[in-house]
Image (spheres, rainbow, N blue to C red):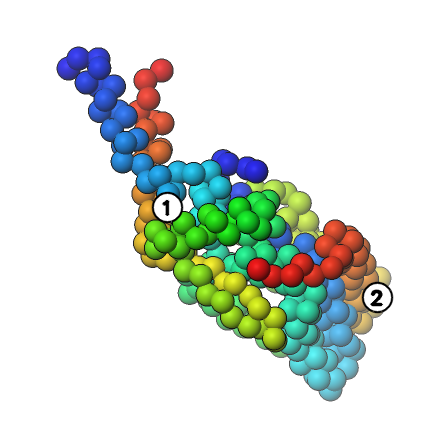
Amino acid sequence: MADSEMHDEHLRPLAEIDRVVHEPARLLILGYLSVVESADFLFLMNQTHLTRGNLSSHLSKLEAAGYVEIKKEFVQKIPRTLLTLTEEGRNAFQQYRRSMAQVLDNLPE
Amino acid sequence: MRTAIELKEIRRETRLALNQDGLDEIMVGLSLGIMAIFFLDFRLSIALVAGCAIQILVKPACRRRITYPRVGYAQLHEARGKGKARTVLLLAVALVMIGIGLFFVSQLRWLLPPYLGIILAGLAIAGVHGSTHIFDYSIAGLFLISGLLGLWLISLGSDPGVATAVQGWGLAVVLIPIGIAKLIRFLQRYPEPVEQK
């Protein structure tokens, strides 16, 4: 097998990387949501150190991709935005981790 | 902004963020301090109920009032460990009941302080299970030391019931100030509730 073909084969998973997940801020959001049942907007903002607008924008993209479910509710008359990772989002996140691990493991020295 | 994804570390950070308010230490200290009264006089079993009520009712209420408005709300993912957590809890309750049973068997009463120390340490370790940071296990160490303190008091001639009560109060005296210090630091760091989106 030619060197270039081998190289292509190693990098093929990279071409299949989910770009919605690949963005660092969204990856971090998915990372936090993957370890909790649910979290609210304020919690994610504190943990990720993203600004309100930035977090909101990334969450909208994740919601559009069907990876995050956003629920607005009132707790003792105080509004709360509750975020949950969907099954689809969990699968995408796991798949991303597997693909990246595969790419990095197979890279030639 | 951090970009490396280490789920173990994220899980630890999430747990730390939710427990940085010191309420765990304060409420455990209060519970133990109140429950200790039972070991002076077993007719005061209401002390056990009051101690449990602090954990079940007061702590969540304080968290809703103090913690969540400041740092936000998150419920840790327990799907994988739900069955395990329930088993640990049932086992702990059974072990505590056995411990209280020891209180009524005069020949074995001296075992009560180390026994409770070991159970509490086990619960503390279960609470931080998976952490690789040695500091997370310091409270478990404290519980074990309290068991030894109780044994030492008994060796000096104290009644085992009194020694167990002193053990509980000793833990309360150590835990509550730690919790208050953490709470003050928490309130200074997050002075006012941030308005939600």
| Residue at horizontal 73 percent and vertical 86 percent from the top | B43
Q: Secondary structure at mark 1?
A: helix
Q: Are marks 1 and 2 in contact (CB under 8 Å)?
A: no
Q: Quadrant of the N terminus of chain B?
A: top right
Q: Nearer the viewer, residue A55 or B7?
A: A55
Q: Position of residue B134 (x, y in %)?
A: 63, 43
**Disc 1: CA contacts within 10 A as few (<14), some (14-19) or many (>=20):** many
- Mark 1: amino acid: Phe
Question: Which residue: 72% across, 74% down?
Answer: B35
Q: Residues within 10 Å of mark 2 (few under 14, many from 20)?
A: few
Q: Position of residue B130 (x, y in %)?
A: 52, 48
Which residue occupies 21% across, 13% down? A3
Q: Is residue B179 left or right of residue B64?
A: right
Q: Do discs 1 and 2 belong to a common subunit?
A: no
Percent x, y of residue B123: 59, 60
Secondary structure at numbered mark 2: loop
Q: Is A9 or B50 nearer to us in this picture?
A: A9
Above or below residue A93? Residue B67 is: below
Tell me: residue A49, above or below residue B74.
above
Q: Is residue B105 visible?
A: no
| Numbered label tally | 2
| Quarter of the view holding residue B18 | bottom right
Above or below, comparing residue A93 to residue B171 in the picture: above
Using the numbered discs, state the Cα–Cα distance from disc 1 to disc 2 in whole angstroms.
61 Å
In the picture, the disc for residue B157 is: 2
Q: Amino acid at mark 2?
A: Gly
Residue A49, numbered circle = none
What residue does disc 1 label? A93
